[in-house]
Image: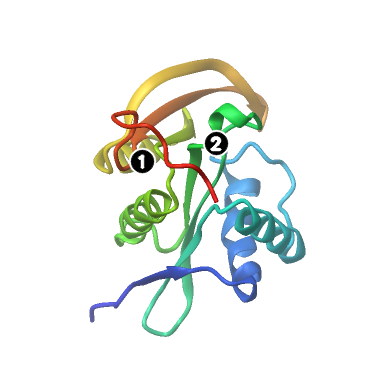
Amino acid sequence: MSVLLTVCEASIEDAAAIADIYAHYVIESTASFETEAPDAATMAERMRRAEAGNYPWLVTRDDDGRVLGFAHANSYADRAGYLYSCETNVYVRYDSVGQGVGTGLIGALIDACEARGFRQAFAVIAGTEPASVVLHARAGYFPVGTLAAAGWKHGKWLDVFIMQRKLGQGADTLPVAAD
């Protein structure tokens, strides 16, 4: 039986499902460098802040409406010069990995970031996550650097890979003034 996957804008009502998906990565893995899983209220607040900053939050739903993954963008750095750059993140329910959820999400996230006028996307990926590196490479990201032993989690030092992708016209033209 085939499952129909739908990518759409996330709503605040999705915060609990998003928090549940993310909790797995916080508690069980080194994909996130957070050490305490945020609850639904915290995730909802993150979503509100992103919306206020014009950053997209997306979810993938199956044909029953269940959230199987989420993707979002946020500020790459808190300086005016980074206005047209963003950091992108994709998380898939641990039991839905390998079913095309991440591929659909990252493609839709790139489109949403381009539609909002962003020109460069960065992915900050733990060195313990080769599947994430492959996902991003297939979506047009390329490696730009490694931060050796940049993080500490679960009793070990972790490298961080930084990957980058041009969005829209990238640096080929001047940016359009933000509204």
Q: What is the image's colouring? A: rainbow
**Left-right relation of 17 to 1:** right
* Mark 2, secondary structure of its residue: loop
Residue for badge 1: 131
Q: Say which quadrant the N terminus sits in.
A: bottom left
Question: Which residue is nearer to you in this view: 112 or 131?
Answer: 112
| Displayed quadrant of residue 170 | top left
Q: Residue at x 37, y 55 (%)?
A: 102
Place of residue 22 in the rendered image (x, y in percent of width and height, measured from the top left) = 59, 55
Numbered disc in front, either 1 or 2? 2
| Displayed quadrant of residue 12 | bottom right
- Residue 83 circle label: 2
Q: Is disc 1 surrounded by few (<14), some (14 to 19) or many (20+) residues within 10 Å?
A: few
Dot 1 or dot 2: first in sequence order is: 2
Q: Do the numbered discs 1 and 2 sit on residues whose CB atoms are within 8 Å?
A: no
23 versus 78 height, above or below = below
Question: Which residue is nearer to you in this view: 96 or 58?
Answer: 58
| Displayed quadrant of residue 109 | bottom left
Question: Which residue is nearer to you in this view: 45 or 64?
Answer: 45
**Can I make out residue 93 in this image?**
no
- The residue sitting at the bottom extreme is 64
Q: Residue at x 51, y 39 (%)?
A: 87
Q: Is disc 2 surrounded by few (<14), some (14 to 19) or many (20+) residues within 10 Å?
A: some
113 versus 124 height, above or below = below
Place of residue 121 in the rendered image (x, y in percent of width and height, measured from the top left) = 42, 37
Q: Residue at x 48, y 37 (%)?
A: 84
Three-letter code, disc 2: Leu
Three-letter code, disc 1: Ala
**Can I make out residue 96 in this image?**
yes
* Mark 1, secondary structure of its residue: helix
Place of residue 165 in the rendered image (x, y in percent of width and height, measured from the top left) = 34, 34
